[in-house]
Structure formats: structure tokens, C-alpha cells
Image (spheres, rainbow, N blue to C red):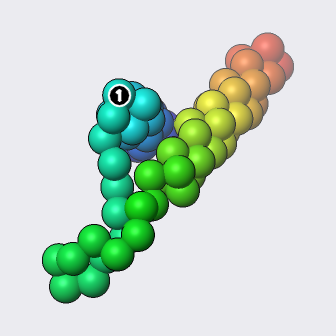
Amino acid sequence: MTHLRLQRTRARDAIWLIEHGATLHDGREGSAMRDATARWLSEQKEVVSEVDRLIALYDGINGLAADSA
């Protein structure tokens, strides 16, 4: 679980940076070739969404296990 929360935190940090002006670029041999900021933002938002879903699933399973004990 901790690794999921850390991944979500890193994704949220990346989202914050992008929303506050950071840009990311695809490149080769140290040279920027094209702006990849929109793709990165989309991917990081998906990470947050998926981790939230997985944590809710995990918490639901643990809640069911605690209720049946």
C-alpha cells in the first residue's frame, strides 16, 4: 500500500509542477524534440485516478474482512 501512496504523491507533485508552468519534452541525445507536457499531465492524472481506485478497492476488501471476523 505504501508504494501506491508514494506513486500517487509523486504523480500529484508532477501535476502541480505542470499546472504551475513546468514543461516536459521528448528528446534524443539531450536535445528537446517535442513538447510532451500535455501527455505527461494526462498520464499523471490517470495514475492518481487508478491509485485512488485501487486504494478504495483495498479498503473495501479490508472492511469486508473486518466485518466477517
Q: In this view, does 69 lie above or below 24?
A: above
Q: In this view, does 4 lie above or below 40?
A: above
Judging by the rendered image, the residue that carries numbered circle 1 is 20
Q: Is residue 17 above or below residue 66?
A: below
Residue at 19% from the left image edge and 85% from the top image edge: 29
Residue at 28% from the left image edge and 71% from the top image edge: 32
Q: How many marks?
A: 1
Instruction: State which quadrant residue 54 falls in.
Output: top right
Furthest residue toward top: 67
Quadrant of the rendering where the C terminus is positioned? top right
Any part of residue 51 in sight: no
Residue 68 shown left or right of residue 45 in the figure: right
Any part of residue 64 in sight: yes
Furthest residue toward bottom: 29
Residue at 34% from the left image edge and 48% from the top image edge: 23
Residue at 65% from the left image edge and 37% from the top image edge: 49
How far from the left and from the top, in percent, is residue 11? 43, 40
Q: In this view, does 54 lie above or below 31?
A: above
Residue 53 shown left or right of residue 18 in the figure: right
- Residue type (three-letter) at the residue carrying disc 1: His
Q: Which residue is nearer to you in this view: 27 or 56?
A: 27
How far from the left and from the top, in percent, is residue 31? 21, 77
Q: Which residue is nearer to you in this view: 12 or 29?
A: 29
Q: How crowded is mark 1: few (under 14 residues within 10 Å), some or many (20 or more)?
A: few
How far from the left and from the top, in percent, is residue 9? 39, 32
Q: Is mark 1 on a helix, strand or loop?
A: loop
Residue 37 shown left or right of residue 23 in the figure: right
